[in-house]
Image: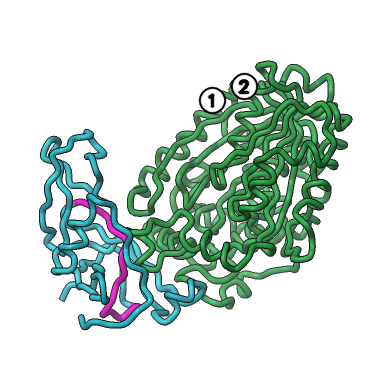
Chain colours: A cyan, B green
Amino acid sequence: MSEQKSSIPAPVPQPWTEEFWKAAREHKFLVQHCDDCNTNIFYPRKFCPECWGANLSWIEASGKGKLYTFTTTLYGVEPRFAPDLPYVLALVDLDEGIRVMTRIVNCDQDKLKCDMPVEIVWQDFDEFSLYYFQPQS
Amino acid sequence: MGRGKLAVIGVGEVPTGWYPDRGDWEMINTTCMEAIRDAGLDKNDIEGVITVNPMAQPKLQSEIGFGKIPEELGLKGCKDICIVNAGGATTTNCLRMAEHWVNNGIAKTVLINHVTRHSGITLADAINFFATAGIDLQWEYPFGMSYNGVMALQATRYMHDTGTTPEELAAVCVANRKWAMLDPNARFRKPLTIEQVLESRMVSTPLHAFECNVLSDGAAAMVVTSGDLAPQISKTPVYKLGEDVLYLGATATQRKERRRMGEGPGAAHKALAEAGLTLEDMDILEIYFAYPHAFLMLLEALGVCKPGEAGGLVMEGHTSPGGKLPCSTIGELSRGHTGSGVSTAYYVECARQLMGKAGERQVPNARYLLTNAAGGSGMNMIWSVWGRDIP
């Protein structure tokens, strides 16, 4: 998708999530992986929340997943999000076994269904990029 | 801590509303005095004050946190104060702390109170506080999450899984309104129909305006004492009989719905077991839910009915005044939401019902009830059982 001006707030990273947002700029979705207990972790942590392991690495997600749930927001949001209305807020389960909050774009809002296959699509802003999803083609 | 160790012996409340011209301290004075009088105590009998932190009002927070309430009210027997903060779950923690105080020689009687005046919050404070309260700045906020949005996400999935209809969701609001029409403390009291709910503005699919709670002003107070002292002071003590809680997670992506619906109500059954009672013994389910689908999900998860059947129960009027399963007599969505104080209002309503002081909405012979509280955007689920006697 093309670059656009927006008042969308930039994510506020922690030192151990900077890598994630840097990769996002290159349109790569990194999933944190614990090499000690072999768990995929989201959101990225300083230590593995399962085993407190510190041997954490990154794997690149396939970008495919299933739409767990969604809502078309029409009204009642902060002024900074108002120009985007109506927008579809969603929870997506990635094939890597993690759940993310996101938006669904490039879709007919009336045809969205829980569990439908979706794929990642990146939205670039001036200083950062966000992962949105669209129905799989 | 334990069965029957804490008792509520007095309550006071100002009606939930919108009071831009009313002072916070006027509301604090009114409710605290009413609760102490209701308990039949002298002001100097109060030995401790524990207050719900008015999270969104920093100035008031520091006034109360620095000990102004006993001084303002002239509570000359007061030994100590504390301010507690756990979001919407704060009042539960005030009660837990009071239970410790009254059973360990710190204070014989404790005043617990709350005030929140959303109408008095400056625009700057409102933006600072509400925009990102309980919303993660990396993983939620940039996508445009709101409280309505996150509850709408849950509603969509619930309707998908159970086949619950928009009419059934709307019926929850109508049932709430029927209770609110009998309650002088409720903010919204005109008759309401399913059609009106469904014709109201769509906020975030599938939730219409009438299905989203409305931030309001409110204040309430309770006087509590130990289970041992309560019958000596009060003719109508209300005992805490059991309690259990589960932490679910701070962010929506981390809270698996399965956990919320499976293990959360497990806590309800543990609370009932501590009380030595069962769900069938409950005369009222005083359920806090904030959005209509959550009420249906909780009824089903508690085991009141099978998944997908709760909407029907509500449509048939069983949860309304006069129904066989009186629920949320506080009127919930028609009451108005007082932020971190919402659970104070719930506990006050529980006490009123069990004291027989609930006026037109009194459930006849209410003896035991189950209630719940939650903080943040659903970070935890607390269940407690209350009764007018210790079984």
Residue A99 highlighted magenta (yes or no)? yes
Q: Which residue is drawn at 68% across and 64% down?
A: B119
Is B305 situated above or below B187? above
Q: Which chain carries label 1?
A: B
Residue B153 highlighted magenta (yes or no)? no
Query: Secondary structure beneath disc 1?
Result: helix
Near-viewer residue (B139 or B192): B139
- How many numbered marks does the figure carry? 2
In the picture, residue A132 is in which quadrant?
A: bottom left
Image location of residue A130, percent across then percent down: 26, 69
Near mark 1 (Cα within 10 A), the count class, few <14, some 14-19 or many ≥20, is: some
Is A135 situated above or below A35? below
Near-viewer residue (B280 or B217): B217
Circle 2 is placed at which residue position? B3
Q: Which amino acid does label 2 sit on?
A: Arg
Q: Distance between the residues labelled 1 and 2?
A: 10 Å
Q: Mark 2 lies on which chain?
A: B
**Image: magenta residue range:** A97-110
Residue B367 seen = yes
CB contact under 8 Å: marks 1 and 2: no
Q: Which residue is drawn at 54% across and 57% down?
A: B312
Circle 1 is placed at which residue position? B273
Q: Which residue is drawn at 81% across and 52% down?
A: B26
For this view, does B218 lie left or right of residue B282?
A: right
Image location of residue A123, percent across then percent down: 24, 75
Q: What residue type is labelled 1?
A: Ala
Image location of residue B196, percent across then percent down: 63, 74
